[in-house]
Image: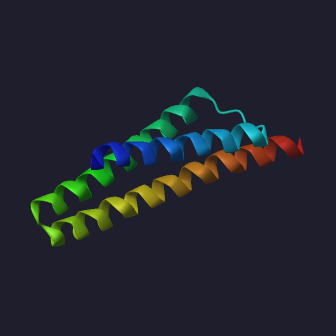
């Protein structure tokens, strides 16, 4: 049941991301879609790892792996958004 909730939350985040960029009129190329989908798959993996460790009773392992993988998700997300938004701002100014 928790896996369904994790998947639903991740998919809702992806759909909000897609909806935001369609409303802003930002078109993504194929490699940006691949990076975006990979980011959301990694977020799904992160939540699944944390839940798996918590289900086993390894709270410290869930915390350590959650922090390590969470930092990677944050850095990846910031780079991805900055890459896409900086490109879209440059194309609107030209």
- Between 77 and 83, which is closer to the camera in this rendering? 77
Q: Position of residue 58 (x, y in %)?
A: 12, 67
* Residue positioned 36% across, 48% down in the render: 6
Q: Position of residue 29 (x, y in %)?
A: 63, 29
- Residue 39 shows up from this direction: no
- Between 67 and 80, which is closer to the camera in this rendering? 67
Q: Position of residue 91 (x, y in %)?
A: 81, 40
- Residue 18 shows up from this direction: yes
Q: Quadrant of residue 21?
A: top right
* Residue positioned 38% across, 43% down in the render: 7
Q: Position of residue 88 (x, y in %)?
A: 75, 43
- Between 93 and 27, which is closer to the camera in this rendering? 27
- Between 48 and 66, which is closer to the camera in this rendering? 48
Q: In the figure, 27 relative to 8: above or below? A: above
Q: Is residue 62 left or right of residue 67?
A: left
* Residue positioned 88% across, 46% down in the render: 93
Q: Residue furthest top?
A: 30
Q: In the figure, 57 relative to 42: above or below? A: below
The colour scheme used to paint the residues is rainbow
Q: Is residue 32 left or right of residue 24?
A: left
Q: Residue furthest bottom?
A: 60
Quadrant, the C terminus: top right
* Residue positioned 57% across, 40% down in the render: 15
Q: Residue furthest front?
A: 1
């Amino acid at each position: 049941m928790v896996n369904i909730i994790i998947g639903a939350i991740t998919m809702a985040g992806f759909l909000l991301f897609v909806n935001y960029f369609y409303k802003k009129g930002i078109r993504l190329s194929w490699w940006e879609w691949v990076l975006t989908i990979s980011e959301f798959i990694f977020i799904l993996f992160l939540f699944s790892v944390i839940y798996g460790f918590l289900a086993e009773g390894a709270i410290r392992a869930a915390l350590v792996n959650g922090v390590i993988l969470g930092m990677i998700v944050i850095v990846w997300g910031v780079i991805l958004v900055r890459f896409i938004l900086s490109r879209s701002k440059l194309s609107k100014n030209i």
